[in-house]
Amino acid sequence: MPQNGPKYVGRFAPSPSGPLHIGSLLAALASYLDAKAHCGTWLLRIEDIDPPREEQGAAQSIIDSLRCHGLIWDGEISWQHQHSHAFEQTLETLLHADELFQCSCSRRQLARNNGLHQRPCIAPLNPDSFALRLKADQREIHFIDRLQGPQHEHMSNAVGDTILKRRDGLYAYQLAVVVDDISSGITDIVRGVDLLDSTARQIYLQQKLSAPTPRYLHIPVLTDTSGDKLSKQRAAPALDNNLSVSNIRRCLQHLGQPTPPASLKNCEDILHWATAHWRVEDIPAQTHILA
Ligand code: GLU
């Protein structure tokens, strides 16, 4: 941690597509402990910009579960659906800078190109139905993940032109996450390794907006016995809030952290101890761990 950089600001940013499960608790815990170990702040942002994928009551259930596990955020909860104005303004800025274009190519059409969008478009523009894409240029994005090591990706060859506003009028995750991380002054992003391949395009967008790039730490994701990531979409079982202490202990073990003394009986004391003993270098440097 640099001594004279900005004060650490981290966040947990769940999408309310289902209740918290052990895999999302792992990400919440890692980002919490890393923030607290750096005497930083830890923000909570509910990424509720995709109503078709939301489950009713999930946001409240996530909030309740975090509380029951002692993972208390700093400040007010941020609700992404309230930030449309900032998303529109950013699109406006990019449009004026000639960084965006309208596109009616379908996912199926792009499958021929491994899902990659490279200009020119395959489909003719349909003025009634188009997405806004960010033009990829020839640059290569480099960053060093604190756990996964050096990463690099060529924008136009490997990432392509990213959708920022979808054809159905919804804001894309890539736009919303970058705009909100910038406006909250996030310095450190700790999240599951499944988002590692979104990172280059997020850094690219930060660069286009002349914003600083945070540090990144992508932790392993938990999988089921068939090797699939536990996820809300795959209906991973909700956490039992009555087992919060053992849930936290289990996550610490998955993160390779030392075992808190058995004398510690509640989440607050365990989290306090785990913060003091947090060692990123002990997190298994792998991408998947069997839950
Ligand atoms: N909302 C995303 C999710 O629940 C996480 C976003 C992020 O951490 O960048 O998978």
Image (tube, rainbow, N blue to C red):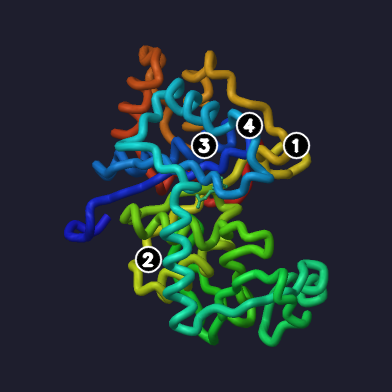
Residue 229 visible? The answer is yes
Quadrant containing the N terminus is bottom left
Q: Nearer the viewer, residue 280 or 244?
A: 244
Q: Which mark is residue 213?
A: 2
| Residues marked 2 and 3 touching at CB (< 8 Å) | no
Position above or below: 191 against 76? below
CA gap between label 2 and label 4 equals 34 Å
Decide which of tag 3 and tag 1 comes sooner along the chain.
3
Q: Which residue is mark 4?
A: 56
Q: Which residue is mark 1?
A: 225
CA gap between label 3 and label 4 equals 23 Å
The yes-or-no answer for disc 2 within 8 Å of ligand 1 is no
Q: Horizontal and vertical percent for residue 151?
A: 51, 68
Q: Which residue is mark 3?
A: 26
| Residues marked 3 and 4 touching at CB (< 8 Å) | no
Residue displayed at 32% across by 27% down: 273
Position above or below: 170 against 30? below
Decide which of tag 2 and tag 4 comes sooner along the chain.
4
CA gap between label 2 and label 1 equals 36 Å
Q: Nearer the viewer, residue 34 or 259?
A: 34
